[in-house]
Image: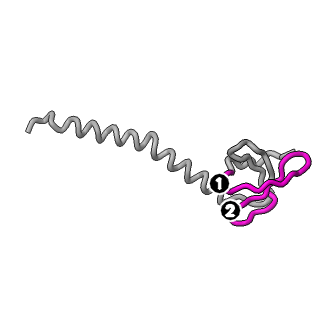
Amino acid sequence: MNPGAYSPIIMTAIFIGIFYFLIIRPQQKRDKQVKEMRNSLKVGDNIVTIGGIHGKITKIKDDVLTIEVGADKTKLQIARWAVGNLNKNETVE
């Protein structure tokens, strides 16, 4: 066999490896961090939803969170998966 016959297979394997380590693996790590953050939420945490709503958690029941938003302390119920960020040092006004 010609030594150059395996060249396309080797190049394809290299590209798949690069794709995995530059795109897939970091995304899996990020997904794991987000899942851990959402599972560690507790009453009193200040959060930002994926829709940009800032609020403070007042009640947690399974996968439904009740948050207070705004100056008049309006209560909203959101799904746990809708939490985008946890703000540890920020207060909601």
64 within the magenta span: yes
Magenta residues (range): 57-82
- Look at 80% across and 45% down and name the residue there: 90
In the shown orientation, is residue 21 left or right of residue 70? left
Specify the principal SS of the magenta part: strand
Looking at the image, is 67 positioned above or below residue 48? below
Q: Secondary structure at mark 2?
A: loop
| Residue 61 picture location, percent across and down | 73, 66
Q: Amino acid at mark 2?
A: Asp
CB contact under 8 Å: marks 1 and 2: yes
**In front: 20, or 58?**
58
Residue for badge 2: 63
* Extreme residue in the right direction: 72
* Extreme residue in the left direction: 1
- Look at 35% across and 41% down and name the residue there: 16
- Look at 61% across and 51% down and name the residue there: 34
The quadrant in which the C terminus is found is top right
- Look at 29% across and 41% down and name the residue there: 13
| Residue 26 picture location, percent across and down | 50, 45
Q: Residues within 10 Å of mark 1 (few under 14, many from 20)?
A: some
Q: Secondary structure at mark 1?
A: helix
| Residue 36 picture location, percent across and down | 61, 57
The quadrant in which the N terminus is found is top left
44 within the magenta span: no
State the mark number for residue 81.
1
* Extreme residue in the top direction: 4
In the shown orientation, is residue 12 left or right of residue 83? left
In the shown orientation, is residue 14 left or right of residue 61? left
State the separation of the CA atoms marked 1 and 2: 8 Å
Q: Amino acid at mark 1?
A: Trp
State the mark number for residue 2.
none
In the shown orientation, is residue 49 left or right of residue 26? right
